[in-house]
Amino acid sequence: MSRQQLLECGDRTEQELNELVGRSEKLLEKTDDPEAKDFVQAVELFRQGLKLARSGGDLKLAANQITCAFLLNNRSVAITMDKLDNLKDQKNKHWILDSDLLIALAKADVNSYACPVLKIMIAQPFFGKHQSSIAVAMTATEVLLDAIADYPSIENPDKDILGGCLTRTNLLFHRSSLHTAMGNRKKAIKDLTNALKIDEFFTKARFSRAHLWASFILKDDRRIHIEFTRVASEFHRDNINIEEVYAWLGITTLTLNDPSIGSVEDAKTHFDKCIKATIRKDELYGPQRRTDQLPLCAQQAHTLFQQLPITEGNQGNLHGIIQGMRGISVDEDEEEIRKNKYTCVKCKAGRKPDGGMVMQCTRCKSVSYCSAECQKASLLVRCIPNIGASLQGGIVGSRDIANISFVQMGISEEPATGGVTGKSNDYEIL
């Protein structure tokens, strides 16, 4: 069935329909980003599928709606492995897919294309935790790729299989996330590269590959800069990942120090666009994020810019700059910052397991942790060390930043690794 047909199959009351249309129009009134349109449609499909399944309706149709939503935009899907009654957010629990229903949907028609997609979805809450669930998802992806290899017409949009979303590019993109969760970045990049060979304008794969290159120093700064430049030209200005694109462009422009790439002023322009994209993302998708919740590369970019001679464009801390551009007094956010200093930034506990006070991070001086375990789990995405105090002289390179972020913090940059055996498609890598 097509996406429109799947949407029209829903059994909604007039009130529910009006609420759903209102939410959709609110986002789409603010932006014409194609991915925002897909997101709105995916949310609608997901919620319709949940309502149909929980009301005792056709589980096969519900499975098609939910899997189509996942393939269209996986951010639209909320999954938990907990029982719904155990969730803290009881108000919105009916818009969350729980494990029992997920398994029931997968069993509704084991021979359908939706079944292996549901198995891929099962791995989402377990990224980096349970390798067995990721292995199941990996095998399910292989099954679908093999099916498309045997019957290429599955990808034909006119066939409307899972709303036309069941494609090799989508599957390779999702499998790259599974490889990354298993710590196998080489295979993740190979899948993203092969997706781009199929469709060179599958830009979210290009962004993900460039992000892996930059985050783990897998390519030189020039190649990374060129790749992000292309991504910036292809992404809509309101794309949800554009803030990270401009952050890396600012970093690489500064560290390369090459007139053919750009000047310091060009780097500042990239950073300014990064900040504006941060504000725009919060405006569109909400809620407003604290500075410690921003992407690591955006925080790194700011740290790097703070090492430049102080000018009107780069003075002040990141929090003050963002709040100033939002037109909000910095004082309005003081309470949130104060709470952040006296609760564990990872698990939100107000005390250590032994009952003692949480401990402030000695590296960034802005967050606290209740235990070493929470600190190690959170450092990769939250803690930014004082680079100026860590390295002597001049502007440091992006490789130095990455080394500080992972090595100097005293933790391994390698996530948990593991493997899965089984048939794999023989794709060539660039």
Image (spheres, rainbow, N blue to C red):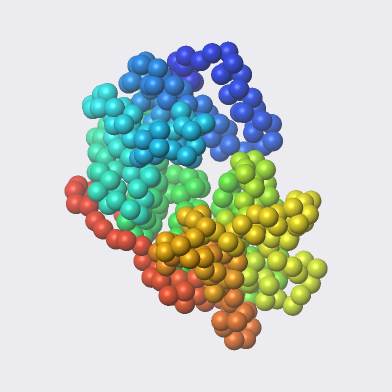
Nearer the observer, 195 or 324: 324
Q: In the image, what residue occupies the spot 58% across and 24% down?
A: 20
The mark tally for this picture is 0
Towards the viewer: 9 or 163 = 9
Image quarter where the N terminus lies is: top left
Residue situated furthest bottom in the rendering: 392
Q: Hey, which residue is sitting farthest front in the picture?
A: 355
Residue at screen point 27% across, 40% down: 140
Instruction: Look at the image and tell me whether residue 248 can be seen.
Output: no
Residue 185 lies in what quarter of the image? Answer: bottom left
Horizontal side, residue 260 vs residue 168: left or right: right
Residue 109 lies in quadrant: top left
Q: Indicate the position of residue 219 as horizontal and vertical percent values.
A: 45, 68
In the image, is residue 250 above or below residue 240?
below
For the point 32% across and 56% down, which residue is it? 182
17 lies above or below 38: above
Q: Residue at x 70, y 76 (%)?
A: 308
- Image quarter hosting the C terminus: bottom left
Residue 324 x %, y %: 77, 56
